[in-house]
Amino acid sequence: MQKKWVISAKRADFKGIANRFGIDQVTARIIRNRDVVGDEAVKEYLQGSLEDLNAPEQMKDILLAAEILQDKIQQGKHIRILGDYDIDGVQSVYILYSALRRCHAQVDYAIPDRMADGYGLNERLVRQAKEEGMDTLLTCDNGIAASGEIALAKELGMTVIITDHHEVPYEKAENGERVYCIPSADAVVNPKQPDCPYPFKNLCGAAVAFKLIQVLYKQMGFPADEAFAYLENAAFATVGDVMDLQGENRILVKEGLKSLNRTRNYGMRALASRNQIPLGAIKAYHIGFVLGPCLNASGRLDTAKRALKMLLAEDECQAAEYAGDLYDLNASRKELTEQGVRQAKEMIEQMGLDKDKVLVIYLPDCHESLAGIIAGRIREQYNRPVFVLTKSEDGVKGSGRSIEQYSMYDEMTKCKELFTKYGGHPMAAGLSLPKERVELFRKTLNENTTLTEEDLCGKIVIDVPMPLSYISKNLVEELGILEPFGKANEKPLFADRDIEIISIRILGKHQNVCRMQVKGKGSAVMPALYFGEPDLFLNFLEERFGSRALAQALAGAGSGMQVSFAYYPEINRYNGRETIQIVVKNFC
């Protein structure tokens, strides 16, 4: 898909910001492009620390929840934690279970089976908890949309505490105002409640659990620093659940990565080792694309309890065994995902679905746990909201991944009568519905959508047009202060035109790396790398410049070809030598 290049043109006194904070004007421009405005915000962005985190006591019902837990612990009542099967859910359960055991609570946990139970609370889990003598249910990363199940738990005489971060369900009143549906739990801890005064609304479920433990530990008389043992888990979940890395989330991840890189958790150490990532080198990228998918794979293809057992492992041998299992499960998940992506693309092309602004793809034989990943991959290619649906025992289940201009949760709420169950965020959602409503679901979403062709036009947003000659080691190293990179704090992108391609080599086990020597105006020759699909790049060069020029470049004999690159600069360190190179993200 050809994407339009757009230069971010947000204005500020870049020279003044650079002088006040001792940074390059290029860095100042990037910070402004991340919507960080004002000296206080810039200072927090650059220098934010644990002292800048919001006080957890500001969260609605968090003191009440901690008081209830303390009372139950002191009475020896049985508490069951009910989590979810994804990264955020697993890390949330780990935080609460480990911390409550530290408080000598009578506690266990249950994680829904993705295939048998689906997402979140259900009647079976509630009744099972009662039958097994549970006094209290403590949810994490779910519960806010389970009003019926929580009402049942209350009818059965159980105490219920909700900790969650998902959108609060609502209905539209006759005057158009939203009427929020808060479950009848004894305490509801979720910063997205409309009357919650907590100033930062975009925490993940594990971060909400972490905040609750901070308050509980304080009430139980534990040293305040003890709760920060779970900072690495909250950080891992924040990245793994693809939360915006802005404000408090950015501090949680930045500081949590420091803890993760010296973790004493046997499971995390074993998982990093199995993926050949040395402690000290773990970045947000590794959580999002290497370590996190291993945790997710257990909940997708087996049971999330396997990932939790790895985190709870009490010796290196046990941890290594679980880490190896998760690694192998993730390898299987990758293969099945590729099959699903191919099937989805074939269906889009054969059925003409690419004319739809909202893609609804029914893959009945696809493993339902992979629907969200496949939806995300299709969204990247077609730049449209995508729902991937699969066959389930009682109809159809599915997951959706969206684009910034389309709130999945809001759009699904407009046609909620189609679903047996639904929930999620603006950018991601899950649903269940009868098979006979699949086509009606597709038509309804597309008839209701206000998406325009402009919304669907893929864009490459350039932070700064920057000639290759401006790149220096000092600047590349300074760009490191912008990390951690992730959603809403993406790795910066630069662009230069009239870059001469001197030579090209195709490398890699799967021939998926294009290594070039390039030269910009006034710059020295430097390496450039393009990952992914070199055939697309080579076809582009041949169509524009001809087969002879391409052949010369492939032979290392120069070519005369000049192109524009969107790129990111980095320092390649090898055998004690340091070389500046660029990583090409797009070309034209």
Image (cartoon, helix red, strand yellow):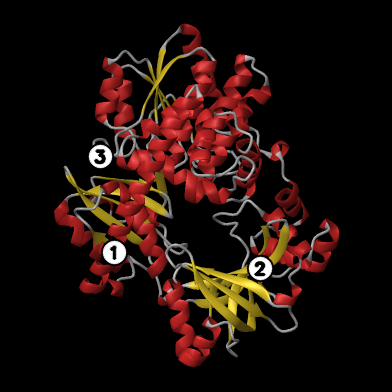
Q: Which residue is mark 3?
A: 115
Please tell me whether mark 3 sits on a helix, a strand or a loop: loop
Mark 1–mark 3 distance (CA, rounded to whole Å): 23 Å
Do the numbered discs 2 and 1 sit on residues whose CB atoms are within 8 Å? no
Q: In the rendered view, would you say 152 is above or below 462?
A: above
Please state the total of marks drawn on the protein image: 3
Could you tell me how far apart the alpha carbons at marks 2 and 3 are, in whole angstroms? 46 Å
Point out residue 365 in the picture as x, y percentages from the top left corner.
Answer: 19, 53
Q: CB of mark 1 within 8 Å of CB of mark 3?
A: no
Give whichever of discs 2 and 1 has the lower sequence position: 1
| Neighbourhood count class around disc 1 (C-alpha, 10 Å): few under 14, some 14–19, many 20 upward | few
Q: Quadrant of the N terminus?
A: bottom left
| Residue identified by numbered label 1 | 342
Check residue 581 in the rendering and tell me which mark sits there, or answer none: 2
Q: Amino acid at mark 1?
A: Arg
Distance in Å between CA atoms under marks 2 and 1 = 33 Å
Give the x, y percent position of residue 215.
Answer: 60, 24
Describe the element under mark 2 as helix, strand or loop: strand
Give the image quarter of residue 362. bottom left
Q: Given this view, does label 1 or label 3 mark the residue nearer the observer?
A: 1
Camera-side residue of 155 and 239: 239
The amino acid type, in three-letter code, at marker 2 is Gln
User: Of the residues shown, which amino acid type is indicated by label 3?
Assistant: Met
Tell me which corner region of the image, top left, top right, bottom left or bottom right, holds residue 442: bottom left
Dot placed on the residue nearer the N-terminal end, 1 or 3 = 3
Q: Is residue 301 left or right of residue 501?
A: left
